[in-house]
Amino acid sequence: MLAEARSGRQYGSGSNDGPFARILAILKSCLNQYKIDPPASDEGEWWLDLVIGDFETNVSYKAERGFGVYLSNEESLGSRPDELFTQPDAAARRILQLVEARREQRSSCMRLSDVRRMAETSQVQLAARLRVNQAVISRLESQNDAKLSTILGYIKALGGHAELVVRFDAFEAPIKLFGDPSPSVGTRGKFKLPRSFKVAA
């Protein structure tokens, strides 16, 4: 188990939960087990091992980086987190999404609907920003082959930005597509949006 992955860990007492206190408070009702490993120095990295039902994860914390959530069951020490969060509430919400994904036996990768929920935005609110019908957002979130420009427009309307990263054995780097495509909307196949996404001012 992840909670037993590193030796010498102690159960969190509540009084020594450090940066994880808010995360633990939010997860309290569903939490089975957790262990906290405080750093040896003030500049070090905190570690939290969580067990919720059959879902297990590690969460790390460094002041300059925030909270890192690890999605793999492999040993996390020394590797970088799969996802980063600046606020404990966002990290806790994402952990709850991951628990739900495990229960539904689906991938732990974020879906568009997960991103929207993390941004605390409803489909209706997002549809208004994009000047489309709410059903358009629902269809977009359930399809598998949306255009990159559609996804960029969706993320921009949520207040974020998306980056494309390529990974090879020999290198990893963000790439820029030619031009800076406006968030026009449309998808291949049966579903085509009626007009371009234009984020409301």
Image: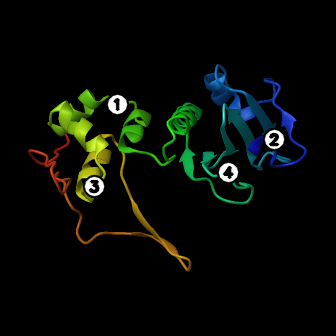
Ranked by sequence position, the earlier of labels 3 and 1 is: 1
Q: Nearer the viewer, mark 1 or mark 2?
A: 1
Residue carrying label 4: 73
* Element under disc 4: loop
Which label belongs to residue 121? 1
Determine crowd level at label 4: few under 14, some 14-19, many 20+ residues with C-alpha closer than 10 A: few
Q: Are marks 3 and 1 in contact (CB under 8 Å)?
A: no
Give x and y (percent) for residue 64. Answer: 63, 49
Disc 4 versus disc 2: distance between alpha carbons? 21 Å
Disc 3 versus disc 1: distance between alpha carbons? 22 Å
* Element under disc 3: loop
- Name the amino acid type tagged 3: Asp
Residue 201 visible, this orientation? no
Q: Nearer the viewer, mark 3 or mark 2?
A: 3
- Name the outermost residue toward the front: 105
Q: Are marks 1 and 2 in contact (CB under 8 Å)?
A: no
- Name the amino acid type tagged 2: Pro
Disc 1 versus disc 2: distance between alpha carbons? 34 Å
Disc 1 versus disc 4: distance between alpha carbons? 30 Å
Residue carrying label 3: 145
- Name the outermost residue toward the top: 29
Ranked by sequence position, the earlier of labels 1 and 4 is: 4
* Element under disc 2: loop
Residue carrying label 2: 38
Name the residue rendered at 36%, 46% in the picture.
Answer: 160
